[in-house]
Amino acid sequence: MPPGGAGGSEHGRTGEEQNQNHPPAIRRRDEPHPASPFPAVASQKQRKKRKPASAAAESVSEGPLVEILARLPYRSLCRFQCVSKQWRQLCSDTIKTIKRAPQTLAGFFHNRLAGNLCFSNLSGGRPLVDASLPFLRGRYQRFKLQQCSTSLLLCKCWGWLSENDEFDFVVCNPMTEQWTVLPPIEWPDDKDDDDDPQCFKLRYPFLVFDPAVPSRFVVFALLIESVDDVAIYSSETRQWTPSSGWEYMEYPAVVPDCAVFLNGMMHFLHLSIDDPFIAVLDIEGEVCRKIAAPDGMLGATPGYYGSVGCSQGLLHAWYMDPHDYELSVWVLKDYATEEWTLRHAIDVPQLFGETESDQEEDCDQEDGSCKYEMFAIHPEYNVIFLTDRKAVSLSYDMDSGQVHPMCASGDFLGGLPFIPCFADLALG
């Protein structure tokens, strides 16, 4: 199935019809009983004839049992190792295989209007993860997804007795069910001799996770009380520290949808009216350079008309004209020259099968936002994902020009791309 294609299923005959046409086969007494595919539930008689544990696990590893285990949640596999020696070896081998396997885009997390979090597989079918995040339910009543950084989620969580203005920011891995609460922002006040630390409100955190170094994550937080500082949280130290690399920079009006982690550096898109640019920061929060945005992005609005992303290890930027909905996608192939190459120009209404009369009727949006949205780019292929914000989401292959519908019911109108990671994290 091509990237972005929606999965489907064929409806066969009912079980009653099948039984009428094909009555159950009758096994003769001299025929042997079928072997149980589950080592833990095999009979005592079968155990006497069984091969050694290593040989049994090896013979079963090629069978359907491994296929079943590979589809189970990561935590379930870890728990199943306690069933028996055979299960421990079998599950351990499956876990090692999962960890070694390269991970790619699996699907999208998205918030529904009803307030619940959902996950849609890229290829359709049963969701890869439990979007209800059951491991958080013991402490929190509800939560809202703020950001997804490849494998980690940043959620705003409300306790069972919390008011609307009382919440925690939680970083979690839905595959391993590890999670941590971001602490309040505070550090010693160098300008004051008192022992009271400087305290800041945590309002706009931005999560950074590098799959190449899965043992840690970093969170950037813009400080409303101080335009010269940015707070940096490290999961290794479990502390916030100030970064003063913004003294002579324009105020960092960062939108999570307009930032990407690439080559060990953060890239924040600043869509100012006169001179849009991309600020490049190191993991310590220091501004290293500024990259001018493509000329065609002049006048873009963060989150609606333009954004940035990473595909095939290269920085990409895109902009959708709010009048004719022409989407332009650029790629930065050479950092030294900082010259952008126009990757593709797309007439978005045509992708959704709209006529000219439909476009004229929906020309102006009441809320001033763009009618269509490009909400993601595939990290490995020249494939982009778009929605009409009403009912339809689709993927578009920029190489072949093929369109693959993803949803037409309005249940999925864009989301945050998720790449699973099974590595243990340094979560406090």
Image (cartoon, rainbow, N blue to C red):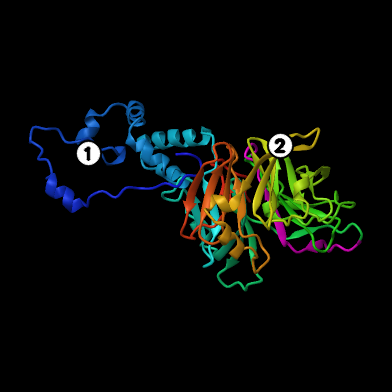
Left/right of residue 385 with respect to residue 200 in the rendered view: left
Up-down: is 400 above or below 153? above
Residue 63: say if magenta. Answer: no
Residue span colored magenta: 192-213
Up-down: is 390 above or below 213? below
The kind of secondary structure element at disc 1 is: loop
Q: Nearer the viewer, residue 48 or 37?
A: 37
Task: Rate crowding at label 2 as few (under 14), some (14 to 19) or many (20 or more) other CA atoms within 10 Å.
Answer: few
Q: Nearer the viewer, residue 144 or 10?
A: 10
Mark 1 = which residue?
43
What's under tag 2, amino acid-wise? Answer: Asn
Q: In the rendered view of the protein, which quadrant contains the N terminus?
A: top left
x and y percentages locating residue 160 in the rendered image:
55, 70
The kind of secondary structure element at disc 2 is: loop
x and y percentages locating residue 335 in the rendered image:
77, 34
Q: Are marks 1 and 2 in contact (CB under 8 Å)?
A: no
- For the question of whether residue 12 can be seen, the reply is yes
Q: Nearer the viewer, residue 256 or 28?
A: 256
x and y percentages locating residue 97 in the rendered image:
47, 33
x and y percentages locating residue 182 in the rendered image:
67, 57
Q: Marks 1/2: CA distance?
A: 55 Å
The residue located at (72%, 62%) in the rendering is: 203
Left/right of residue 215 with respect to residue 126 in the rendered view: right
Closer to the eye: label 1 or 2: 2
Q: Main secondary structure of the magenta part?
A: loop
Up-down: is 263 above or below 276? above
The residue located at (63%, 51%) in the rendering is: 428
The numbered dot on residue 263 is 2
Q: Nearer the viewer, residue 190 or 397?
A: 397
The residue located at (8%, 36%) in the rendering is: 28
Up-down: is 399 above or below 406? above
